[in-house]
Image: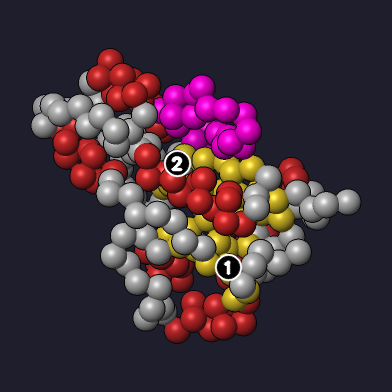
């Protein structure tokens, strides 16, 4: 029986924008994933605060995917957003492995900035027991000059294609350049602008109605 492949795109989604959707679609297509789950964090241990609450960010991710063709296979996963206290990826993946079983391939989708930062994550080397890592270059953050410990894992686990295994590989894929970042988007929103084309209309409507990211 064919192995189920599940991609995970995590992040604060503060707010969700077209770059997030492009990342999910690129990973899906490049790696042949059965589905990609967009997973907003609850309380991220690496970020002291967010511009919107976890409930608001979850609502915006749902709106970002609302109305998409089911054939896109982009889903919302609320397990971190609904959790109390800080969330750690290794714990989330442990729960997902229990839920999806030992045979499914779980693929954690990362940008190059997160790959550089990987050694700061809780029990980061345990991630390879639970999932594959799929990495793409993000903005101007190079895939060169990785921390020595990460480079060693890439040398040991790197593959040209997603391995036929539940976990343990590191693969790289390309995505088109998307000129948007959450930081720049929040700055535009703080100035009272409506950056059409950078975030789905339903998300911008939600931001307007809840007066999110506005300067006091």
Q: Is residue 188 magenta?
A: no
Left or right for 178, reference 126: left
Given residues 170 and 22, the one toward you in this image is 22
User: Circle 2 sits in a helix, a strand or a loop, which is it?
Assistant: helix
- Residue drawn at point x = 40 percent, y = 54 percent: 176
Rendered location of residue 32, percent (x, y) = 65, 53
Extreme residue in the right direction: 1
- Residue drawn at point x = 46 percent, y = 49 percent: 23
Task: Please tell me in which quadrant of the rendered image residue 43 appears.
Answer: top left
Left or right for 120, reference 192: right
Q: In this figure, which residue is indicated by the disc labeled 1? A: 171
Instruction: Please rate how many residues cluster around mark 1, counting C-alpha atoms within 10 Å: few if below 14, some from 14 to 19, many from 20.
Output: many
Q: Is residue 71 magenta?
A: yes
Q: Are marks 2 and 1 in contact (CB under 8 Å)?
A: no
- Residue drawn at point x = 64 percent, y = 67 percent: 161
Camera sees residue 108 = no
User: Circle 1 sits in a helix, a strand or a loop, which is it?
Assistant: strand
Rendered location of residue 200, percent (x, y) = 36, 29
Q: In this figure, which residue is indicated by the disc labeled 2? A: 21
Q: Label 2 vs label 1: CA separation?
A: 20 Å
Q: Which residues are magenta?
A: 59-83
Given residues 147 and 37, the one toward you in this image is 37
Instruction: Please rate how many residues cluster around mark 2, counting C-alpha atoms within 10 Å: few if below 14, some from 14 to 19, many from 20.
Output: some
Rendered location of residue 208, percent (x, y) = 25, 19
- Residue drawn at point x = 35 percent, y = 71 percent: 142
């Amino acid at each position: 029986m064919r192995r189920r492949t599940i991609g995970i795109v995590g992040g604060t989604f503060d707010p969700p924008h077209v770059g997030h959707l492009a990342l999910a679609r690129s990973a899906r297509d490049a790696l042949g994933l059965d589905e990609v789950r967009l997973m907003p964090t609850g309380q991220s241990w690496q970020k002291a605060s967010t511009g919107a609450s976890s409930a608001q960010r979850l609502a915006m991710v749902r709106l970002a995917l609302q109305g998409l063709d089911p054939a896109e296979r982009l889903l919302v996963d609320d397990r971190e957003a609904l959790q109390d206290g800080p969330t750690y990826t290794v714990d989330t993946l442990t729960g997902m492995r229990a839920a999806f079983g030992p045979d499914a391939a779980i693929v954690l989708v990362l940008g190059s900035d997160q790959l550089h930062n990987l050694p700061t994550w809780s029990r980061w080397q345990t991630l390879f027991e639970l999932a594959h890592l799929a990495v793409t270059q993000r903005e101007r953050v190079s895939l060169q000059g990785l921390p020595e410990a990460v480079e060693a894992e890439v040398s040991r686990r790197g593959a040209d294609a997603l391995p036929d295994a539940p976990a343990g590989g590191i693969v790289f894929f390309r995505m088109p350049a998307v000129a948007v970042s959450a930081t720049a988007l929040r700055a535009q929103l703080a100035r009272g602008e409506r950056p059409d084309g950078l975030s789905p209309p339903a998300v911008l409507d939600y931001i307007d109605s809840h007066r999110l990211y506005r300067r006091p």
